[in-house]
Image (tube, rainbow, N blue to C red):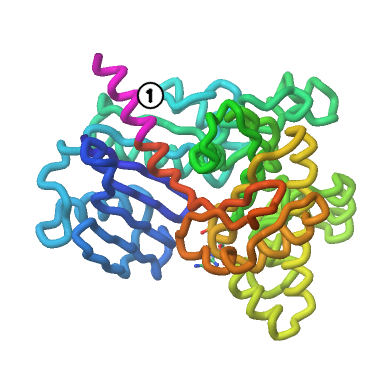
Amino acid sequence: MKILVINAGSSSLKFQLLDMSDNESVLAKGICEKIGLKNGFVKYQNYKGYEKKFLVHLKNHEEAFSFVKNLFLDKKYGVIKHLEEIVAVGHRVVQGGEEFSKPTLINKHLISIVKKLTPIAPIHNPANLHMILACQAVFGEKFPQIAVFDTAFHSTLPPKAYIYSLPYEFYEKYGVRKYGYHGISHYYVSNECAKLLNKDIKDTKIITCHLGNGASISAIKGGKSMDTTMGFTPADGIIMGTRSGSLDPGIITFVCEKNNISMHDFNKIVNKNSGLLGVSGVSNDAREILKEASLGNKRAILAHDIFCYQVMKSIASYIAVLGGCDAIVFTGGIGENRFEYRNTICDSLSFMGIKIDKNLNKLTVDGKQAEISDGESSVKIFVIPTNEEIVIARETLSILKRIRV
Ligand code: ADP
């Protein structure tokens, strides 16, 4: 049972081919980056230990997919003999709105809704649609493709968490509400955390911190998302690589008038030129920021401080939302690797009895999973590398089994 998992971004395409009948093993995986640009490349590796970076100008997502498909079938680098060995494709789809609260078989209706939701996720949904259509072109229209939504996990949010304090008609007419994102990741790490706690997920209160280029934090009770920092769009919440996170709404008209720019331009600024990059003026990358900060760059230090401060504030408020907390989980590129950030964040929560083991924390990087709390800590702290692909593959398989009955 070979299942292909696709995660398309605006100029990237992550892929993983898994054999779900054989211990959920990964046959091949990789990423196409800078799609549309001359300096594009594809990183590819297979289960035989073969690893290569191809420098290739891929004009669009269709070309990228065709390149990947040929790699799968290649005599030297390939992992399958015929395309028919792949039984289904699972797609990460970012915005599914209120209609899709669980993984769904892709059909014309789903495609039209994902298209309709594009204004809320203008970077992600079009890329997801492109890839769905590219797969249809290769595998045929009747071939099972499944959408696993980033928003679905947060469909359990109570109205008091998802309704904005705007005229209620904006929600009714336009669907303006908190949707939340990174749901596949929050779902995966919270379930792994319950296993590590040796508890039924139904009996847990967990705060998951997905800290990458995009970053969000979720309060999860009994396996259900109760609140999350991202909102109507993925620009809301805490400071991110290039996204501002939450802002005073008054800033929008003020800056647009001062700089004589449109709302559209402002939206670009809050998504592309803000966050760690905007504050530090150095980079959106936490590695670069830390390097500059260690050299005494004041704005790099400030960007780092803001990041840790906002994560700390979110965790503390979510402990109140949950009425206590069994565990805090760190995941995502920063959460999994930047022990300095985890240190600062947890130290600032020490007044609650939250205590990190500095040594364990430092050792837990590069995809390692571990508990990093001190034995005396009031709340357990874990680093759990996320695995959105395995969730998508499992959900795809489960739907495939249902439709084949
Ligand atoms: P995305 O949200 O685009 O998936 P990632 O989860 O890959 O992003 O996170 C990117 C961030 O994680 C960057 O700020 C980067 O500095 C940091 N990061 C990723 N890998 C490492 C690593 N091995 N060591 C230190 N920092 C890392």
Q: Position of residue 370 (x, y in %)?
A: 51, 55
Residue at mark 1:
105
Q: Is mark 1 within 8 Å of ligand 1?
A: no
Query: What span is colored magenta in the figure?
Result: 394-405
Residue at the image point whose x is 52% and y is 24% from the top: 100
Q: Quadrant of residue 83?
A: top left
Q: Position of residue 10 (x, y in %)?
A: 49, 51
Classify 10 Å Cα crowding around label 1: few (below 14), some (14-19), many (20 and above).
some
Q: For numbered disc 1, what is the local secondary structure?
A: strand
Q: Label 1 amino acid?
A: Leu
Q: Nearer the viewer, residue 18 or 68?
A: 18
Residue sitting at x 50%, y 33%? 149
In magenta segment, residue 401: yes
* Nearer to the camera, 397 or 250: 397
Toward the bottom, the furthest residue is 295
Can residue 114 be found in the magenta stretch? no
Q: Is residue 22 visible?
A: yes
Q: Is residue 255 left or right of residue 197?
A: right
Please state, as top left, top right, bottom left or bottom right, where the C terminus lies in the image. Answer: top left
* Quadrant of res 47: bottom left
Q: Answer left or right for 44 relative to 281.
A: left
- Residue lying at 60% horizontally and 40% vertically, measured from the top left: 181
Left or right relative to 156: residue 323: right
The percent position of residue 310, horizontal first and vertical second, equals: 77, 54
Image point (77%, 66%), residue name:
305
- The kind of secondary structure the magenta stretch mainly shows is helix
Dividing the picture into quadrants, the one containing residue 153 is top right
